[in-house]
Image: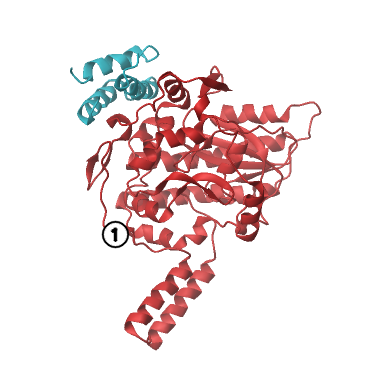
Amino acid sequence: MAKTVSHVVRRPGRHLGDPDVEIPVADDLTSVPGIPLNEKDISFYNRIYPEETQNIIKAADREWVWTVYTEELAEYRHYHEEVGKPLIKAAAASGNLAPTGTPVPDVDVTEAIRQKARKFGFGEVGFTKFDKRFTYIGKRRWVKYPHAICLALEQDYVQTQSLPSMDAEYAHFGTYEIEGALLLDLADFIRTLGYRAQVHSPNDNSAPYIPMFVAAGLGQLGANGQLLSPHFGSRARIAMITTDAPVTYDQPIDYGIHKFCQKCQVCVNRCPGRAITQDKVWWRGVEKNKLIYERCRPVMARYDGCAVCMKTCPIQRYGMGPVMEHYVETGEVLGKGTHNLEGYTFPDKGYTGPGELPMFDREFFEIPHGRSEDWLFDQFKEKLMHEGTPSNEEMAEFAERVKDILETGRTTIGSE
Amino acid sequence: MFDKTHIDALFADLDNEWRGKAEFDQLSRDAHLGIALFDAGRPLNDIDPRAVSLIERHKPKG
């Protein structure tokens, strides 16, 4: 049944120079620009229970994944880490670099940066305040400059639709590599305008970036926990540059996604790990479908990064415009219930189509969890309970491993 | 509705005929969108005719 249109969102085309696109938002999909949130709760949770990067708080499973990666994925991940090192290092130091030019009065710095970023190939570019509340503990002294430039670089379409696969992983990590270099170039450009710029690498995150992308109007949070932007949904790698350039902020937009995801639910239904909650909950001051990490991670690790939730998202597959137009015309979700959108293949489970899910034993989901030292202590406790007092050699080995973890340090660097 | 057999055959042809050419990416997008519209019983007016041709060739019979 056709729907009434509440409003139409007009956005720049996918590439620089493309005509603008218009996305109709049905009446029954309207909620709020951005995301329903409670500012007091956001401030409370981030002050009393601040976030830290998963590279630290989930380090135990990040070490474990290397034991279950396929040979090809392990080799590629090693390669990606080597390629990424100089990019991450340069990004980490970028905030200290001095401007190379002098500010020119009456120059629209916002549009100059936006156009340059679009020329570089960023499909989405938006400006907002860097919300310090979200900064990871380990980055709180590192982050400089008050304004955030949010940047999304689209991944290859064809490769991504082959998820889960090594081809899709090449697109995923390859896009990080290209993006890492482009960010440094864009920061250099900002310095020529007379301002400072700090690159927040996508592989050395300073904070969860999605809240700021939503605040900048670049999309809305999908049920799959990913930013859904108009042209490519979540099929992108996101990063940020902070600057002291006097930019004009963009505003959050209601694309209808917050309610659309509750109508769609394809990612919820198709997630092999059953890791996405059907209903939204209030989490740290934001209303969202909560991802259950412990159900997601074991699948991601064993199946080339999984990302079925990205593959089966109609916004990702077809674009927000066609999906919303279809919803307005028919009241239905484009592709829902079809093999084209919902089907996927796991090598050892075969093809699963709409209404089917691969099955896993309980043991499949039992993986190391938490910080490295916490997991080590959990294992030590288990051993103590089942085998009694450890020998002096075992105690020494335990102490040595804790020492190794502490000496290695808590790195914020990593990518998924 | 397109099932896996139809979909695999369509994209195999798309791959054979267009991979490596400038139009490959856009035709892939149009093919996916076209299949979705076909499955939903909607017209394919805005789909590239070359993608429509593939859809016609591989669509489920009946």
| Colour scheme | by chain
User: In the image, is A296 to the left or to the right of A58?
Assistant: left
The residue located at (54%, 63%) in the rendering is A410
Q: What is the total number of numbered labels drawn onto the structure image?
A: 1
Residue A119 place in picture, x, y as percent: 58, 27
The residue located at (67%, 44%) in the rendering is A130
Letter of the chain in red: A
User: In the image, is A326 to the left or to the right of A252?
Assistant: left
Residue A335 place in picture, x, y as percent: 35, 28
Residue A199 place in picture, x, y as percent: 62, 44
Q: In this view, does A390 lie above or below B34?
A: below
Q: In which quarter of the image is residue A124?
A: top right
* Residue that protrudes farthest toward the left in the picture: B62
Q: In this view, does A202 lie above or below B13?
A: below
In-front residue for pair A11/A354: A354
Q: Callout 1: residue from which chain? A: A
The hue of chain B in the figure is cyan
Q: Quadrant of residue A223?
A: top left
User: In the image, is A62 to the left or to the right of A125?
Assistant: left
Q: Is residue A174 above or below residue B5?
A: below
Q: Return the residue at label 1.
A: A362
In-front residue for pair B14/A331: A331
User: In the image, is A6 to the left or to the right of A268?
Assistant: right
In-front residue for pair A130/A101: A130
The kind of residue on which mark 1 rests is Arg
Q: Is residue B56 above or below residue A273?
A: above
Residue count near mark 1 (Cα–Cα under 10 Å), binned few <14, some 14–19, many ≥20: few
Q: In which quarter of the image is residue A1?
A: top left
Q: Can residue A268 be seen in this view?
A: yes
The residue located at (53%, 40%) in the rendering is A238
Check disc 1 and report its element: helix, strand or loop: helix
Residue A134 place in picture, x, y as percent: 62, 50
